[in-house]
Image (cartoon, coloured by chain):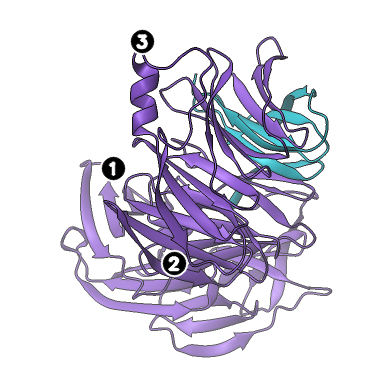
Amino acid sequence: MFVSGGDDHRVKVWNYKTKKCMFTLTGHGDYVRTVEFHAELPWILSCSDDQSVRLWNWQSRSAIAILTGHSHYVMCATFHPDDTLIASASLDQTVRVWDFARLKEKSTQKTGGRPGEIFGATEVEVKHILEGHERGVNWVAFHPTMRIVASAADDKSIKLWRLSGNKHWEMDTMKGHANNVSCVIFHPRLEILLSNSEDKTLRLWDLNRRVQIQQTRRDTDRYWILAAHPTLNYFAAGYDNGMSVFKLERERHASQRIGSSIFFVKSKNLYVYDLSTKEKFLMAAVNTNGKQVLLNQPKSVYYNYFNQSGHDVILNFDGENSCFIIYEFQKDLKQANCTLEKRGDNTLGAVFISKDKMCVLDMNRELAVCNLDGGSIKKVTLNKKGLNRVEMIYPAPLGRLLVHADDAIFLYDLAARKVLQELTLAEGTVVK
Amino acid sequence: MISKFETKSKRVKGLSFHKYRPWILASLHNGSINLFDYRAQALIDKFEDHDGPVRGVAFHDT
């Protein structure tokens, strides 16, 4: 079963198995903006340009409450995940938080209410009116566990509000969007907010530090809507010419296997796992030093197999502020003693090319050979005709480099300065 | 961000994930509601009964 609401003022309930509209709820006098089911009660919540928020019982197929008070279009209405609260956002520049405890009580009493009775202000009271936005508010979301509300508005800002008893206050304002903010949602499990806007960007925000941590831009599409999967790490965004389902990060941990050792990062720690003894050893805590690397999960882990006398590991991070971190360890991995930890900022990837050298691709897509302490030795200009854009570099045998550039992958010899082998990629090939 | 599935359509104004199945509903500005399987990367069904843009859509948890 699902519910929909449209510009025809109608709320429709559908059976996707029979592929039919089961019934239509009428009453709204203008465009219906959002619709939602309650998690337990047989209720539907809707809001409309007619300035009202409405509750419907989908079992009796009738209206049960009309919440009035907003003085402009109501753009979004949502149930609290477990409390008897509703939040609504309106172009009247406010967010209202309503408490329907009394309505719930009445509706679950057998004696309560005459059939067909529609409730209003006495059964659903306004608990908070959140004022602060300077333009209309398009979206409102409850935090899944904390008493926090996020709102997105035409004043280009996102605001966070804290509710406490009958009190509320504005916690913070997050600016960055260059146009009306369409939608904002909380990550169901992590301390992250997602927002999107008519400025054609989708942005991620750190909920604790309230700073932007990532953004993606579409060339021609304004964004309109966001949704989070309730249990899996999927998100979806709707825009002018379609929609996209995406994940924020890889779920498979980056790793590298060398002989019987597997190097990997989990929960901000670098580990080595020994396949023969089935033991796991902590090698280092991954500290990105406040550098905003999303969720701290590296995109690749490289072990220096050219170095026979020690152990070196590179972690490459991507995202808006991507970087690499290199670690050097003393002989025994089981008592890993980190003797060097060095970070290189604004890099796309770093790989080992010899015992004591690595090759680094920077944000300008320029290559350089560096010492393991990060000191640059020389710039590398790839000797290849028609080379346009280097996408990424990957490890190869001594003194060589695998390069993904344009629509090809090639093996490059750094000393001889020539392409040894080349593979042309079919259009749309994903290189991982 | 890692894209898993993309569709081309008219303006998407409403989205809802199914809690258990790999499904997503998209309600469109042209009046249609599309049901996709994002794992199989396929359109499963279209629901067309609204007259005008459909701005909101939501699955029930069942």
First in sequence, mark 3 or 2: give its number: 3
Chain of the residue under the numbered disc 1 shown in the image? A
Q: Position of residue A260 (x, y in %)?
A: 32, 47
Share a chain, discs 3 and 1?
Answer: yes
**Which mark is nearer the camera, 3 or 1?**
3
> Marks 3/2: CA distance?
55 Å
First in sequence, mark 3 or 1: give its number: 3
Label 1 sits on what residue type? Leu
Judge from the rendering whether residue A136 lies leftward or rightward of residue A162; answer left or right: right
Q: Which residue is mark 2?
A: A293
Q: In what element is the residue under mark 2?
A: loop
Q: Choose top left, top right, bottom left or bottom right for residue A413.
A: bottom right
Name the colour assigned to chain B in the rendering.
cyan
Height in image: A385 above or below A118? below
- Front-most of residues A324 and B32: B32
Judge from the rendering whether residue A99 lies leftward or rightward of residue A386; answer left or right: left
Chain of the residue under the numbered disc 3 shown in the image? A
- For the question of whether residue A350 can be seen, the reply is no
The crowding category of the residue bearing disc 3, from other C-alpha atoms within 10 Å (few below 14, some 14 to 19, many at least 20), is: few
The crowding category of the residue bearing disc 1, from other C-alpha atoms within 10 Å (few below 14, some 14 to 19, many at least 20), is: few
Height in image: A431 above or below A144? below
Q: Position of residue A308 (x, y in %)?
A: 33, 68
Judge from the rendering whether residue A312 lies leftward or rightward of residue A7; answer left or right: left
> Marks 1/2: CA distance?
30 Å
Q: Which residue is mark 1?
A: A275
Q: Which residue is mark 3?
A: A110
- Front-most of residues A383 and A325: A325
Label 2 sits on what residue type? Val
In the image, what residue occupies the spot 57% across and 89% down? A378
Name the colour assigned to chain A in the rendering.
purple
Share a chain, discs 1 and 2?
Answer: yes
